[in-house]
Amino acid sequence: MTTRDTQPHPRRISGPVRVGMIGAGFAAKFHMENFPAGKAAVVGVTSPRASSREEFARRHGITAYSSVEEMLPHVDAVDICSPPSSHAEYMRQAAQAGVHIIIEKPFTGFFGSPASCTKQQMLDAVHAELKTLRQEILRSGITLGYAENCVYAPSVQKEREVVEQTRAQILRMQGEESHNGSHSPVYGIWSVQGGGSLIAKGCHPLTPILYLKRKEGMARLGRPIRPATVSARTHTITKLPGFEDRGFLRTTYQDTEDYALLHVVFDDGTVADITASELVLGGIHDYVEVFANNHRTRCHISPVRVADVYSPSHEVTKDLYFVEKISTNEGWIPCPGNDNWANGREGELTDIIGAIHEGRPPECGLDLAIDTTLALYAGYVSAEALGREVPVPLL
Ligand SMILES: NC(=O)c1ccc[n+]([C@@H]2O[C@H](COP(=O)([O-])OP(=O)(O)OC[C@H]3O[C@@H](n4cnc5c(N)ncnc54)[C@H](O)[C@@H]3O)[C@@H](O)[C@H]2O)c1
């Protein structure tokens, strides 16, 4: 039997892409708001707790399945919105069944105890897993969309256009995602999340930064410019003996950091600096700034100020939604109008579903997901050595 005969085949799609949700929590909820009408139809959901998957299914008029295996025969694509430790196994199952994949960040990682090994061992394990996973996905012929919303933020897409059209050379970039700590009870546990701020938050600005350098490389040199080395530091500020907890920041991190700094050197010698933390009040602080040889752009990702709303008292506006993760609706409130548009969650699913229909790669796919993951774990190796420069072992 030839290799060709044993390859799974992606499902043929004539109507809307039939999507099965994996996970019924926060990310699944905002994904449900953003599937392009007429192009995708969410038909099923699975998650471990019967009560939550059945409630989710009832709310959306879809079928609850007790497992991914049970759901796979009924869908063209899965949308993986479960905790990071489950991502790789679900991607493998979907690829084996010829089912397309939409996968939330972070792509995958190392999910043992950080006390059980060195960070180099972690990076080696992640590298080996990514290599196999990549082969399985490519062999399956399916489309994989890495749902990194920041790549699809209108501000980042505008900057892509500027870079491509003016053949700009990006000299340095700066990016951040920070807020006051995740809502998820399993955040802060390495074996579930694969790390702390560096991976969970740092991935958000890192992927659009890697994306823009790829686009620059293709426009100017006919090849993607990719990360070569990283240096990083991580800290757990809320665990310092002198930290005074005033109750506004989450502090329940089991074995992960709450602050990270990553310096990336690209293969053309240019650089990017990324900050990620759980130490920021005032809502999500999410941006990428580009310093090029012919222009400079501030990509606002969150908040994006379409309106500034002033509320003299929390009572006036307490039942209204303005912007993600702000702790009070009082005073001046930066308001994006439509969060999902401003932070790229809308554009992300439109592109990935379009890519599945058209059999083309999405803007944010497997290669970016893999480069992001390897750069982050090389970052952990560097942080363990207090900032030593570490090569990114690209596939
Ligand atoms: N792009 C973004 O801005 C963004 C924001 C939040 C979360 N996320 C990502 O989305 C994913 C889910 O995070 P969340 O905030 O929705 O978490 P959550 O805790 O709110 O929801 C997770 C859901 O997955 C289910 N689940 C748990 N273990 C599972 C397993 N083994 N198999 C299948 N389902 C399982 C849970 O029951 C729950 O329904 C994570 O990868 C997270 O990093 C992305």
Image: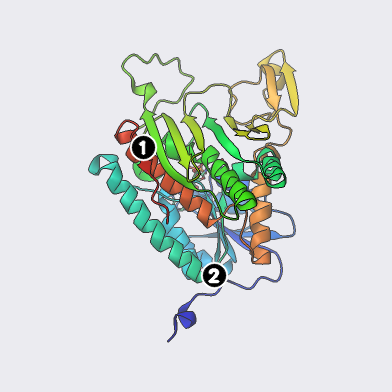
For the point 61% across and 60% down, which residue is it?
A: 361
In this view, 303 is above or below 44: above
For the point 69% across and 17% down, which residue is it?
A: 332
Q: Which colour scheme is used?
A: rainbow
Q: Quadrant of residue 195?
A: top left
Ligand 1 within 8 Å of disc 2? The answer is: no
Q: Nearer the viewer, residue 272 or 348?
A: 272
Q: What residue type is labelled 1?
A: Glu
Residue 107 visible, this angle: no
Which numbered circle lies on residue 370?
A: none
Residue 324 is situated, as x and y percent measured from the top left of the image, at 61, 31
Q: What residue type is labelled 2?
A: Gly
Label 1: how many Cα within 10 Å (few below 14, some 14–19, many 20+)? some
| Callout 2: SS | loop
Which numbered circle lies on residue 389?
A: 1
Pointer 2: what residue?
141
